[in-house]
Image (cartoon, rainbow, N blue to C red):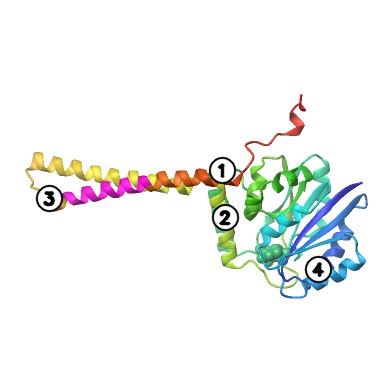
Amino acid sequence: MKTVNIIVPVYNEEQNIAALFEAIKTNIPDKYRFKVVFINDGSTDNSLEEIKKLKENNPEIHLISFTRNFGHQIAIFAGLEHCEGDCAITMDADFQDPPELIPKLLESWEAGFPLVFARRIKRHKDSFVKKITAKVYYWLLTVASKVEMHAQVGDFRLMDQKVVEIIRRMPAEAKYLRGIISWTGCKYNFVDYERPSRVAGKTKYSMSKMVNLALDGLFSFSMLPLKLGLILGISSISVGLLFMLYIIYDTLFNNEIYPLYKWLVVVILMFVGFLFILIWILAEYIGRIYSEKLNRPLYIIDDENSDKKT
Ligand code: UDP
Ligand code: MG
């Protein structure tokens, strides 16, 4: 019998916990054993007590409780670190990731996809601004990181245990899981759904948490921002050079006299340009130190299409 782990990060979701557990229980097909890992991410309401109470009668529940709020992505990572089984499904506690989708995710997994993403087909609940920023952001991230990032995909997904093991080895990546999961390059499939509104409580993703998540994604998957110094440096030097050529031309052919202070513009542009280039060189070294520190594996082998060890 295969074991399915359901990983649910919880931050002040007291009204949702019991109902969610029931919904998960009814939606897992009978042929699977299942475990629900609740990660209490420093809730300040009664979420922890709710989970403990539920746990008394339901041995399928596994509880991890943080000392304080460490964040949604870290909570999911902790869940992944603590689950043993055949696959893991990560989902939110607020029913925005409908438990009715679980059988479809499992079907796709059984059909041979180690990664199954639940994809929102409509974001009609989101504001126009959120839709546009999401589109632009994921486009930028895909271009900058050269890893395919999917705009309509959140943290509702199924991962084969093989993928879970890969992710576990990279704790430094926990802050932007959807990035590193796409980065693994494992074969994936989508299950489409319409994202409903939150059942109870309020969103815990404040604007600042959202911006931080976006920045984590951009900075840990792209070294492109580091090149900014190079671009600015070359531009500044080029403009300086053009000025210089113009002054020389004007002096030689139009007999214009340029006092020394006018030459200063050229000197400043060139000098600033060289400074920018220097900053870029430093940035490149820092970038290299950073990527060494992340300790990502150099490659991931596709077991299906490779020969076993000789
Ligand atoms: N969450 C968490 N820690 C946080 C913020 C959120 O564990 O700091 C949990 C929350 O309880 C929910 C999930 O992460 O189960 C998604 O949060 P939310 O629904 O507030 O985000 P939204 O759907 O509004 O983007
Ligand atoms: Mg939500």
Residue 14, position as x, y percentages in the image: 78, 72
| CA gap, disc 1 and disc 4 | 40 Å
The reply to whether discs 2 and 4 touch (Cβ–Cβ < 8 Å) is no
Disc with the residue nearer the chain's start (1 vs 4): 4
Looking at the picture, which amino acid does disc 1 mark? Glu
> In this rendering, would 28 be left or right of 208?
right
Q: Quadrant of ligand 1?
A: bottom right
Rendered position, 122 above or below 301: below
The reply to whether discs 3 and 1 touch (Cβ–Cβ < 8 Å) is no
Residue depth check, mark 1 versus mark 4: number of the one nearer the observer = 1
Provide the major secondary structure of the magenta segment.
helix
Which residues make up the magenta segment? 263-278
Residue depth check, mark 1 versus mark 2: number of the one nearer the observer = 1
Residue at 87%, 57% in the rendered image: 27
Residue with the mark numbered 2: 216
Q: Please, what secondary structure does the residue beneath circle 1 have?
A: helix
